[in-house]
Image (spheres, rainbow, N blue to C red):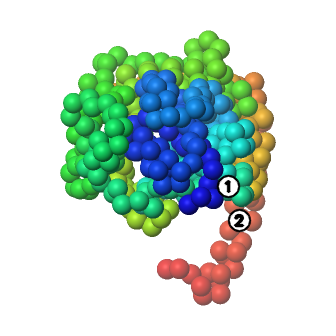
Amino acid sequence: MTDVNKVVLAYSGGLDTSVILKWLQDTYNCEIVTFTADLGQGEEVEPARAKAEALGVKEIYIDDLREEFVRDFVFPMFRANTIYEGEYLLGTSIARPLIAKRLVEIANETGADAISHGATGKGNDQVRFELGAYALKPGVKVIAPWREWDLLSREKLLAYAEKHNIPIERHGKKSPYSMDANLLHISYEGGVLEDTWSEHEEDMWRWSVAPENAPDTPTYLELTYRKGDIVAIDGKEMTPAQVLTYLNKVGGDNGIGRVDIVENRYVGMKARGCYETPGGTIMLKGHRAMESITLDREVMHLKDELMPKYASLIYNGYWWSPERHMLQQMIDASQANVNGVVRLKLYKGNIMVVGRKSDDSLFDAAVATFEDDAGAYDQQDAEGFIKLNALRLRIAASKGRSLL
């Protein structure tokens, strides 16, 4: 395996990627560049530097990508009201194209001819990383150790680490769950969750209180939108990452954003996962409310029809595809008038829209009123409208094609 001279490794400093780092050095006899991303996962990323240095790495990248993550990936996704299979807000999925982009950028900067990741051969992430990498750097070589080595258990990984003097921090009893976190969400898989009949354990959750333990008084929020994105909360201007950080806190405090789902992975299997997405859940509710008064009916309905396809593209790793780009341009064009303020009421796991206003509102009280509309709408017009729309039904029934 001498065709690889330098590899950029997506590196967290944990057991898996620390073993991968050493394994790459020994198996490919190559130079390693490490890349550690701060996506708002809530853990310090700087310790990864010392761990990489201890394993002889000379080129170490530790990047704070929180603003780019929310501004260029999360916000565009939420303009489409994106949700996968009715429940999943794509917290893991939307982080992968950014990591792939940065891996390729670093490979170009350092002259590396390969990239490597720690995703297993069973999951979606291998697809997401690699589709992104090939779309951005067609000739790049991708090394996926989990598809090559025989270290297919935690016990084997620990034994490898001990044999090669790889420093592994131990923090008491290991969580039984496989977890992934960023500013949009935290996910849980494995452990008791592999039994679809077993209820998830309450002490699993990290970001939110149980709805029944949330405050007995509601919390009100006012979200200010500009072209479909939240730019202020309760009148205070915020950056994209600040918006999501704040909404995660207030949402978690009110028991918002927990889901327990079985999803269809792209590789073909079903998998159960639990997700905490407090800020994203609030964002979805608020955005739909803002669109409800600012979008034309047919534009809104077309967006809703296209959204499942857009969600599947993100879930399956096609963020960098031409079809996702095409859909994004259409979605973004629809947001030109999605401006205004939405007022939300959070209470024990629930989000209620209690107000919305916009200078670009299409809501006309003079037309919609149940009171005297002073001639703004001629109700007799409805008769012809109904008869025209009933014409094909009447013809079919007259020809003996009644459905009764």
In the image, residue 200 lies at what x, y percent? 25, 44
The image shows residue 253, relative to residue 29, as above or below, that is above
Question: Closer to the observer: label 2 or label 1?
Answer: 1
The answer to which of marks 2 and 1 sits earlier in the sequence is 1
Q: Position of residue 60 (x, y in %)?
A: 58, 31
Whether residue 163 is situated above or below residue 72 in the rendered picture: below
Amino acid found under the numbered disc labelled 1: Val
Q: What SS does tag 2 mark?
A: helix
Which residue bears the numbered disc 2? 389
Q: Mark 1 points at which residue?
A: 140
Q: What residue is rendered at 25% in x and 37% in y?
A: 174
- Using the rendered view, name the quadrant where residue 222 is placed: top right
Is residue 228 visible in the rendered image? The answer is yes
Is residue 31 toward the left or the right of residue 186 in the image? right
CB atoms of marks 2 and 1 within 8 Å: no
Residue at image location 21% in from the left, 30% down from the top: 172
The image position of residue 106, as x and y in percent, is 67, 39
Quadrant in which residue 393 is drawn: bottom right
Residue 348 is labelled as none
Q: Residue at x 60, y 87 (%)?
A: 400
Work out whether residue 215 or residue 169 is closer to the camera in this orientation and state it.
Answer: 169
In-image side of 177 versus 343 (left or right): left
Q: Please tell me which residue lies in front, 294 or 40.
A: 40
Mark 1, secondary structure of its residue: loop
Front residue (pair 384, 364): 364
